[in-house]
Image (spheres, grey):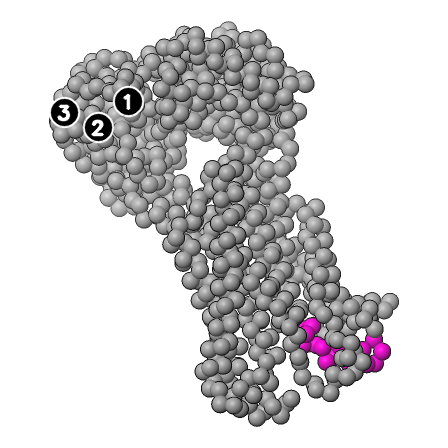
Amino acid sequence: MSFLRDLRIALRSLSRVRTLWITVALTLALGIGANAAIFSVVRAVLLRPLANRDEDRLLYVRQSAPGLGQPNTAFSVPEIKDMGEGLKTIQELGTFSEIDFTIVGLGTPREIPAGVVDGNYFHVMGLRPVLGRLLTPSDDGPNATGAAVLTYKFWRESQHGDPGVIGKTVRLESAMGARSAVIVGVLEPSVPYPVSTEIIANVVTSPHHLSATMVTGREHRMTEVFARLAPGATLDAARAELNTVYASMVAAHPETYKPEDHYKIDVTRMHDQINLRANTILWVLFAASGLLFVIASSNVANLVLARTVRREPELAVRAALGAGRAALRRSLLAESLVLCGSGALLAVMIAIPMVEVLARYAARFSVRAVGMTLDFSLVWFGIGLALIAAVFLAFIPRLPSLDVLRGNGMASGGTRVTGGSSRRLRVFAIMQITASFLLLAGSAVLLRTLYELEKTRPPFDTTKVLAVNLPVMSYGKTPLQVQDFYREVLRRTAALPGVEQVSTGFSVPWRDEQGLNIKFAFTVQGSKRENGLGDRRAGFRSVSPGFFGTLGVPILEGRDFRESDKDGAERVVIVSESVAKSLFPGQDALNRDMQWTDPVMKFIGISYEPRRIIGVVPDIDDENIIPSPGMSVYQPVDQEGWQGRLFVRAKQDPYALVPAISRTVHELSADQPVERASTLEDIRAEVLTPDRLNAVVFGGFAAVALLISVVGVAGVLAFSVSGRTREFGIRMALGAQPRNILTGVLLEGLVIASIGVGTGLVVGFGFARALSKYVAEVQQPGALSVVASAILILAAAVIASAVPAARAARINAVEALRAE
């Protein structure tokens, strides 16, 4: 009951210092709430088990060719057969190929991301259906019936969870043809990897996957491989066995695996592979929230310590009236519990919306963050932190000395600042400055990166160019009819009011990652490689006449494609400036013959016959926000096909044209999807979103940390000034000028900040060096970022010192001495 009385007294006492109460509660709430929210995301994305059965045995197998600049080349069917024979550490392999289907038969026809898998895939992945069944080995083979499984998200959002979807027959259109499939099941909620899909179908639904070139072509790589460890086998044993098998395969086919390409194989656990992109960013974010908690705790400790020292006369009175040390500590604990408890409750209120924001942020790096909420088990952890903080804050202040407790120091009535209390206040302030400096330096790196990205403009127009997806629909049409359809779309769209120019192509800059990554080996007449190196590789682009004009890209040499550059006519290409300069330095590239030499060409219907270079255009880096020189070869769509994207240059607002474009296309084909209409500028902005979010999140942490640190430094100096009133009075009585007092207090704040910055430099540099040994993605802050952060911290310290310094300079010497 006596402790309840202490709590009531604490509430009454704190109600008289509401500013302190609110400041402490808000500071603790920010520290605890941020940590609870961040760890909720970390736990959900990085630590939570997958839905896959026996996930510790689920592996991801990757082939790469560093010599070709390809970190993941995928696998071909012959490679998978060779690799899978006789494995002892691997129980089973499952395969997955990324593909885009246009689905007809489930509402409005639209293009969806999909996967084509073998019958082992779902068993290897350890997944189950929530409705119907999944694909099995009985669904394999060219004579199998087309079958497809809907992902849970697609089923819930697009089909509204309708169980009647099972058994429906749909048509799946792809670039290589159309096939029908029966919906046989709905997959349980799970992490989609390697890409997010809405439907997963068997191999027979993709005509290309059944072609002889796909089945026999060793270089035709478009399949991802997953594996399941055999019982009792380890990851290291599986890696060693796969490397042995792979080495034998490479040795048996030297014509395919050239030494300079450095082909190699690796295997990782599926859980680690899924978290690869999110791993670094979330742990760094967690470290940032930890720093914020250190800053918040130090600030609260400063405030409570300063209040306790100021209360020495009150504590002395209570001691003189018979209160022992235990009773005094209990009263301090009661106040700390009220302060920290209110902070913990406020932390829960802050953490809930913070988790929603951070989940949207983390979803940019991992699909596991989609739809997550606050993990309330972590709220108890936060409350536990608050209780620990309360005990810490109750016992860190020193009680009045023995003489004071006996009543000997009551007469003075003034507050004496003990050296130990003053030192502790400064230590806490330096801790805050150190942590704030680390956060500011990290944020400065991200802000500088974002600034570089924002200010760099692509070499083509982005604001007036609209990109629209018009996926190829080949059902019931010959290739010639498909080409005629796109020509008519171009003709009618060009006639619409407000349209300046129109063209088609195969991929949209920055958006169509699968198409933009296509690079093939080629050679050019009159150009030779030195030191026996293989042929150069260039980005493969298929565009219509007028494409460069639509994007606002000039023709540097030669001419653009014409309507006469069609199938049956002389084959022609346009090359990027890098191709011309690297192959023909100081010479004319026009009218030279180039020839594709990549073995993959025979699998995708592109001939090896020579093509005449008719034009040179500037390098167009349509993959990266910061452009870099790159070799690209452009071919006319009427000779090679490969289209499905419409580009429209508008005279005014591009989005105002979307209804008219949709109406025009649907007049030609009612089932034709017209999707994802967006300006290139908005697509670019979407690509920049993760970098902007990085800067905003870390910048927000840094701003809060700096604000708390400013309050902390101001509190330390205000406490120091109040305790040195007598000293300042004597100095001024002896002739010291107010400006001397002012300068001294400002200098004190500057010294505290300088020590904090120096400590931050040492700690940050050491931590970054240690972390870089394990995490290659860590970016060291440059000198500009460090200097800017240090200047900001020091300036904030001077500003924080201004108010207590001005108060010290206004002290009246006579009144100060009389008060003593």
Residue type at mark 3?
A: Leu
Task: Please indicate whether residue 530 sits to the left or right of residue 740 in the image.
Answer: left
Looking at the image, residue 266 sits to the left or right of residue 258; the answer is: right
Instruction: Establish if 651 lies above or below 614.
Output: below
Q: Dot 1, crowdedness within 10 Å: few (<14), some or many (≥20)? A: many
| Callout 3 crowding tier (Cα within 10 Å): few <14, some 14–19, many ≥20 | some
* Residue with the mark numbered 3: 590
From the viewer's perspective, is residue 82 above or below residue 73?
Answer: above
Residue 321 among those drawn in magenta: yes
Q: Disc 2 and disc 1: Cα gap in Å?
A: 10 Å
Decide which of tag 3 and tag 1 comes sooner along the chain: 1
Hey, which residue is sitting farthest right in the picture? 1
Q: Nearer the viewer, residue 284 or 759?
A: 759
Where is the N terminus found, in terms of image quarters? bottom right
Callout 2: helix, strand or loop?
A: helix
- Determine whether label 2 and label 1 are within 8 Å by CB: yes
Q: Give the labeled residue for mark 2.
A: 582
Residue 536 numbered tag: 1
Residue 615 or residue 415, whichever sits in front: 415
Q: Is residue 813 visible?
A: yes
Instruction: Report the residue at 77% width, 79% height from top.
Output: 403
Callout 1 amino acid: Arg
Q: What residue type is disc 2 on? A: Ser
Q: Position of residue 187 (x, y in %)?
A: 60, 25
> In the shown orientation, is residue 457 left or right of residue 580?
right
- The mark lying in front, picked from 2 and 3, is 2
Res. 651 mark = none
Q: Residue 11's spot in the image, x, y percent?
A: 74, 71
Give the residues drawn in magenta, as a range.
306-323
Residue 164: in sight, yes or no? no
- Circle 2 residues within 10 Å: few <14, some 14–19, many ≥20: few
